[in-house]
Image (cartoon, rainbow, N blue to C red):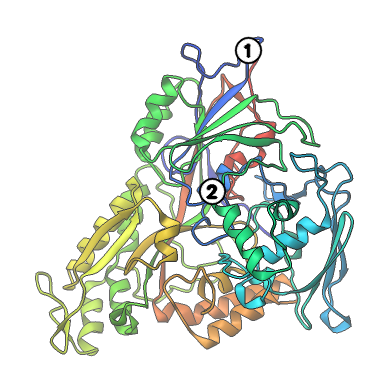
Amino acid sequence: MFKRRKTLALAAAAASAVLVASGCSGDGGGGGEGGPKEVTWVINSLPGAWQATSLAGGSVYVVQMLSGVLPYTGQWQPDATYEYDMDVLAEEPTLVNDDPDEGPFEWSITLADDAVWSDGEPMTGEDLRVSWMLGTSPEEGYCADCDPRASTSFDKVDNVQVDGKTATFQLKEGLADPEWMGLFDAHSQAGGFLPAHLAEENGWDVDDPDELGEYYAWLHAERPDWSGGPFIITEGDLENEVVKEPNPNYFGEAPALDKVTMLFNTDEGTFVNAFVNGEIDGANPADYSEDVITQVQDLPNAELTIAEGATWEHVDLNLKNEQLQDVELRRAIFTAIDRDDIANRNFGGGYPDYELKNNHVFAADSPYYVDHFEGESQGTGDLDEARSILEEAGYEGFESGETLSLDGDEIGPFRLRSTDSTVRNTSVQLIQAQLAEIGITANIEMTDDLGGMLAASEYDIVQYGWSGSPYFTGNADQFWHSESGSNYGGYSNEEVDDLAQQSVNAPDLDTAADLSNQAMEILVPDAYVLPIMAEPNYFFANTDRLVNVQDNLQSSYRATYNIGEWDVAS
């Protein structure tokens, strides 16, 4: 049902993962016969927190930083098949009832007998219960001051019964969840599940909402000295790097590596030299860089793959800005923006087969795909049409060199924001120039804290990416529901809210997909989110050194999805 997107294994066009070799120079890296096996990996932006559950921490950078630390119940593999983690689980999760008409939708998860945290404490159903409560919205009453980025699936749960290693979940009356198996897997809100016993050790009662909220804040603020995976973070901070070493109490197969250092480096211009000099072993940049790809493709020890990834770029408007509450102004802005120009300037040279994204949820090769932009002027760069929209709405000053106004009041200037990458720099400069053609001033401001900026709605126009997986039933609810913490720009439409909620609770995937498409039929004319394209992702590795390392376009973990299996060539 879920299809892998087209891939291209050549050099020249994408961004998201960089695998390079370290330890080739002097005494760095190690890995020689009898020496320590060490790998250095680059993450191309600063993580916003120590956990990924919150709005500020909800980025791929945090997820990848935590790779090998959080236990999870399963994940999508690079070939788009799903595998349960049978080191963590005693058996595959059991669906007890999937018909809400016959009683509560219910399933159970049983953790393996030998599954323990790094301090030796056993993993139990209580860990799952507490992780569920930490993922719920404050309105549910379990966790005060929590700000989870995607609480929909968690809020649907009515109760959790714990019996030792087993947790049984029941949904609220009449609700269903066709993607129930994903609540604690690698693609979930946290990227796995969290320990419950540390709350008690620190004096917090998990059944007191205020105290659970304190535990939630602590988890995000403090570097974890605990682990439930093959590695444990032994040192580091959120500004420079983290260092991981094998978890001595890991219950699965011991990792082959002795040390993994993850550097936070936003300067992609340094990647290739670091690779050539043996200073780094790889990276997962979430941004396209044709310069890096062009340089890497000719290196004899580099394997490079390029593919259309799961992260899609889009432009959003902040409806908390009173001027942008006018749908006609929003439509004119999106009409002036030329998506094809943006995509071609960024990707055309290295990935000429790019396709614009005309569906916010489904890729063009999905059986559920519907083209929601067919016949739409949005994203076309049709300046005459944009000016016509403005003129009919009573605006003046919509020619190039003029200043747009309404009833004598200047429109803008607007804050146009993104992270500081080559692709997004190019994009926002093009958008700035395109909007100037209809009298709108957009002042570019970059940020190195995407999660914090979005959570605070500190923008008027923003470009960023959503990183997805084959799951989709909760997308509409997370992106556009008026009460969603991830609906950063404050879009509100009762009909979309209703359709989004129905999609989350649909009895099957076909129904959920139809409801998601119905929501998009309303969303697109409202001109809130303008998708550009699924950004091509690149991955390169030093094949003379690294083994068992490959990209995973189905996961936010990307190449770090199987970090416990990484090794260096002997």
Residue 183 sits in which quadrant?
Answer: bottom right
Q: Write the residue at 80% across / 58% down.
A: 126
Where does the C terminus fall, quadrant-wise?
top right
Q: Position of residue 540 (x, y in %)?
A: 50, 32
Residue at left offset 61%, top offset 26%: 259
Task: Kindly identify the amino acid type of the residue bearing the numbered disc 1.
Answer: Gly
Q: Residue at x 72, y 65 (%)?
A: 179
Q: How far apart are marks 1 and 2 (CA)?
A: 30 Å
The residue singled out by tag 1 in the image is: 35
On screen, 271 above or below 276?
Answer: below
Res. 81 in view: no
Give whichever of 181, 108 is nearer the camera. 108
Q: Residue 222 location, x and y as percent? A: 56, 48
Image point (37%, 29%), residue name? 295
Q: Which residue is at the front of the view, 101 or 262? A: 262
Please give left or right for residue 87 compared with residue 529 in the image.
right
